[in-house]
Image: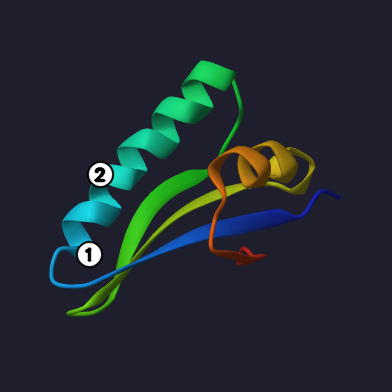
Amino acid sequence: MNRKLKLIWDFRGSNSQKTAEHHCIHLKEFAAIEKLHFYKVDFSILSEMHTIAFIIVDEVDMKIFRDTLKPHRGQLAE
């Protein structure tokens, strides 16, 4: 069974939500251009000054996303 991984980008500051929302657009565009499967692209507001953008992918596809897009961190997706 292939594990799902959540690749995460952190954005901080008063514009963190807008930046994370915009980053989600680029994550979807990258996946479409490279013809890569993903489960979900979204953002989460952690605080007024900290928002994350994330993409959930299969572990087998993780390296291309990681090496090209340089996420700040990753974790197993629930």
Give the image location of residue 43, x and y in percent. 33, 58
- At label 2, the amino acid type is His
Q: Is residue 73 above or below residue 54?
A: below
Quarter of the image for the C terminus: give it: bottom right
Q: Position of residue 39 (x, y in %)?
A: 54, 43
Identify the residue position indicated by label 1 in the image: 16
Front-most of residues 2 and 61: 61
Query: Is 17 on the left or on the right of 44, as rendered?
Result: left
Residue 70, image x, y percentages: 57, 50
Q: Residue at x 69, y 54 (%)?
A: 4
Q: Is residue 15 left or right of residue 34?
A: left
Q: Is residue 45 left or right of residue 18?
A: right
Mark 1 residue type: Ser
Q: Which residue has dot 2 on it? A: 22
Q: Residue at x 41, y 26 (%)?
A: 29
State how far apart marks 1 and 2 are (Cα): 10 Å
User: Going from the N terminus, do you reach mark 1 or mark 2 first?
Assistant: 1
Image disc number at residue 69: none
- Residue 19's x, y, as percent? 23, 54
Does residue 36 sit above or below 6 in this rendering? above
Q: Are marks 1 and 2 in contact (CB under 8 Å)?
A: no
Label 2 neighbour load within 10 Å: few <14, some 14-19, many 20+: few
Please state if 6 lies on the left or on the right of 47 as rendered. Answer: right
Q: Quadrant of residue 71?
A: bottom right
Position of 61 relative to 10 (above/below): above
Q: Secondary structure at mark 1?
A: helix
* Residue lying farthest to the right in this orientation: 1
